Image (cartoon, rainbow, N blue to C red):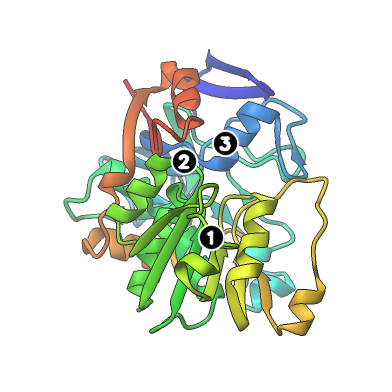
């Protein structure tokens, strides 16, 4: 079978390996669809994301759906042929964070397709892969495998909005109109936001954000004449989500959010850091919070997708067979031509 591995920056290889066999409590899944995430692209382009550095060949891929090919002994919830949404998080369930209901902060987290630990946790960009039964949710509805592959990134967006507190009736700013930014637009709408504004420096993601529910979109690098800052154009925001990973966008959030407002950092900022005007947090009583992966929101995401409460299909730009993984990664890295690119079995 084929498997995609990243050996370092700009070094992606599609290789042949034996098909795996499931053990007790496990299932062997056939890849349905796998979305290329921003973190996958960072591993491909730079050999790292933030402080997570590739130190051995890494199989990326964590936005995955599949069908059950084989079941191991003791598996009771799944059978061959089942369509499945897959949760890439495997928390220990025993540590302080897990016991507090914050599994995403588990100190022993095994998150698929991640170089956050060593040896790395290998991901799912491969034709067949083995999963624990508890990470698989069988789906009986007509939702497609390509839509189910959006369960993980939609969950990231739902967790980010959850970290913002109530957005009911509030004005929301999203800096970065990529896949997660667009999904945050959807999640904020589900949570009752009154107005959602999205900024970016590329036209295509802004057009996509508008199509999925943003009230207004703004080119952050092309403010109208006479506008000193973004707030002069769109007004102040009650809540801002920084999704792009750009220091300039963080500054834009700080300048635009109201006194007593909240900023949620979703994007990964440069590992070397940057100069940050922390006194604004103090003097204006701004809440600056982080959001990392997700917890219970995965179940919400699957439900929203299967009940058609959100429509993620407009975000899908292209699908490539696994053997063309490098071409898929290069398209996914071009925001002017794509939003979400997926890999599928040929």
Element at badge 1? loop
The answer for how far apart the CA atoms under marks 1 and 3 are is 40 Å
Give whichever of 190, 70 is nearer the camera: 190
Give whichever of 83, 40 is nearer the camera: 40
**What residue is shown with label 3?**
40
Please state the horizontal and vertical placement of residue 237, each as a whole percent of the image.
51, 75
Q: Which mark is residue 226?
A: 1
Q: Is residue 93 visible?
A: no
Q: Which mark is residue 281?
A: none
Q: Is residue 49 visible?
A: yes
Residue at 83 percent of width and 56 percent of height: 275
> Quick check: 165 above or below 87?
below
Which mark is first along the chain, 3 or 1? 3
Please state the horizontal and vertical placement of residue 325, each as a whole percent of the image.
46, 21
Which mark is first along the chain, 2 or 1? 2
Give whichever of 229, 237 is nearer the camera: 229
Residue at 72 percent of width and 45 percent of height: 116
The answer for how far apart the CA atoms under marks 3 and 2 are is 21 Å
Q: Which mark is residue 202?
A: 2
Q: Residues within 10 Å of mark 3 (few under 14, many from 20)?
A: many
> Quick check: 98 above or below 211?
below
Give whichever of 248, 138 is nearer the camera: 248
Left-right relation of 143 to 169: left
Which mark is first along the chain, 2 or 3? 3
Q: Where does the N terminus fall, quadrant-wise?
A: top left
The answer for how far apart the CA atoms under marks 1 and 2 are is 22 Å
**Marks 1 and 2 in Cβ contact (< 8 Å):** no
């Amino acid at each position: 079978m084929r498997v995609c591995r990243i050996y370092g920056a700009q070094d992606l290889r599609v290789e042949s390996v034996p098909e795996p066999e499931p053990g007790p409590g496990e299932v062997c899944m056939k890849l349905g669809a796998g979305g290329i995430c921003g973190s996958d692209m960072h591993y491909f382009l730079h050999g790292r994301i933030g402080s997570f550095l590739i130190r051995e060949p890494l199989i990326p891929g964590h936005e995955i759906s599949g069908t059950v090919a084989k079941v191991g002994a003791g598996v009771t919830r799944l059978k061959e042929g089942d369509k499945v949404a897959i949760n890439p998080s495997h928390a220990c369930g025993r540590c302080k964070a897990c016991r507090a209901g914050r599994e995403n902060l588990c100190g022993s987290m095994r998150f698929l397709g991640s170089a956050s630990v060593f040896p790395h946790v290998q991901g799912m960009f491969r034709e067949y892969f083995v999963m624990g039964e508890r990470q698989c949710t069988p789906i009986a509805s007509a939702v497609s495998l390509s839509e189910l592959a959006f369960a993980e990134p939609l969950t990231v967006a739902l967790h980010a909005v959850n970290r913002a507190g109530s957005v009911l009736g509030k004005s929301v700013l999203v800096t970065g109109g990529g896949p997660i930014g667009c999904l945050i637009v959807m999640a904020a709408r589900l949570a009752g936001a009154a107005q959602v504004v999205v900024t970016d420096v590329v036209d295509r993601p802004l057009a996509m954000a508008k199509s999925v529910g943003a009230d207004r979109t703004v080119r952050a690098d092309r403010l109208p004449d006479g506008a000193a800052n973004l707030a002069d154009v769109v007004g102040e925001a009650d809540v801002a989500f920084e999704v792009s990973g750009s220091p300039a966008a963080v500054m834009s959030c700080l300048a635009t959010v109201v006194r007593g407002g909240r900023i949620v950092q979703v994007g990964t900022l440069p590992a070397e850091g940057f100069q940050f005007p922390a006194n604004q947090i103090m003097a204006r009583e701004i809440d600056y919070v982080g959001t990392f992966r997700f917890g219970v929101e995965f179940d919400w995401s699957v439900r929203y997708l299967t009940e058609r409460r959100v429509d993620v299909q407009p975000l899908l730009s292209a699908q490539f067979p696994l053997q063309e993984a490098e071409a898929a990664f290069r398209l996914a890295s071009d925001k002017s031509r794509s939003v979400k690119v997926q890999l599928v079995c040929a």
